[in-house]
Amino acid sequence: MAKDTSNKSPLVRYAPLALIGVVALVGAFALRDYLSFDALRENREALIAFRDGNFVLTVLGFVLCYVLIVTFSLPGALIATLTGGFLFGTLFGAAVNVTAATIGATLIFSAARMGLGDKLKARMDASDGMVAKIKKGLDENQWSMLFFIRLVPAVPFFVANLIPAFLSVPLRRFMISTFVGIIPGSLVYTSVGAGLGEVFARGETPNLGIIFEPHILLPILGLCVLSVLPVIIKAVTGKKEILK
């Protein structure tokens, strides 16, 4: 059950969101040159040397940086994912990336729900007509819709963190759907990162649009269809019941 934040002062409720907004704005200008592919290429040898001498510290430091990037919506989330693959390989790198991204997403989800989620949910619950129907439909199909917005490459990660907060999705459900739902995309980009050594050696740039190539995109779209299949079945069977 979500905690009631309606009795908290506006300063307490909105402070986390305000902090995220300020840091995101500052970071967008101050860090864009540091969280870039060029920065990774220029510092690759130093990163590898540090990893080889301090593996556990590298993992912990990387997770902390990735969590901060996601929580404050800083530029460089894709570069961070590539770096995870570059430093730790495809499988372990994907596990680290998914874990860090889920932690960061959970923090921004919690901040948004604390600031706006409960108030918006109360208004939707008190509404009738079309708004009430939309809210009811989302409540009945939360798992499907949560997986869907995570799997669709066109849905920005930041948006997929905020929508569930405004609909008062349970924290546990949000965390599970986020962790599982981002695995396919994370695996793709982590595998690209794992091959960056060869890309750097050839003086080339990685294909960051690989996720939109047919052999990658079609399986992910297939997962999207599977995620919303319960919604489609429920809608079809519901119409049949009405027609009887």
Image (cartoon, grey):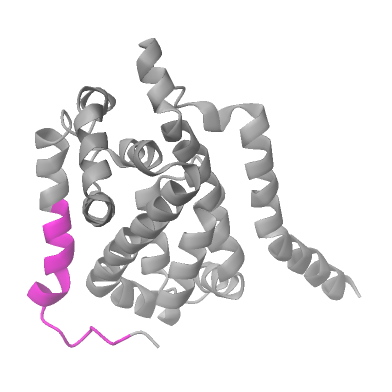
Q: Please state which of residues 67 and 22 is positioned toward the viewer in this rendering.
A: 67
In this view, 49 is above or below 209:
below
Q: Position of residue 191 (x, y in %)?
A: 49, 36
Magenta-span inclusion, residue 202: no
In this view, 55 is above or below 235:
above
Magenta-span inclusion, residue 16: yes
Magenta segment, which residues? 3-21
In the rendered structure, the answer to whether residue 244 lies left or right of residue 92 reads right
The picture quadrant where one finds residue 77 is: top left
Residue located 44% across and 73% down the image: 169
- Kindly tell me whether residue 204 is visible in this rendering: no
Q: Position of residue 42 (x, y in %)?
A: 21, 22
Residue located 39% across and 54% down the image: 96
Q: Please state which of residues 153 and 123 is positioned toward the viewer in this rendering.
A: 153
On-image quarter of the N terminus: bottom left
In the rendered structure, the answer to whether residue 68 lies left or right of residue 135 reads left
In this view, 3 is above or below 25:
below
Q: Position of residue 180 (x, y in %)?
A: 53, 60
In the rendered structure, the answer to whether residue 57 lies left or right of residue 83 reads left
- Kindly tell me whether residue 178 is visible in this rendering: yes
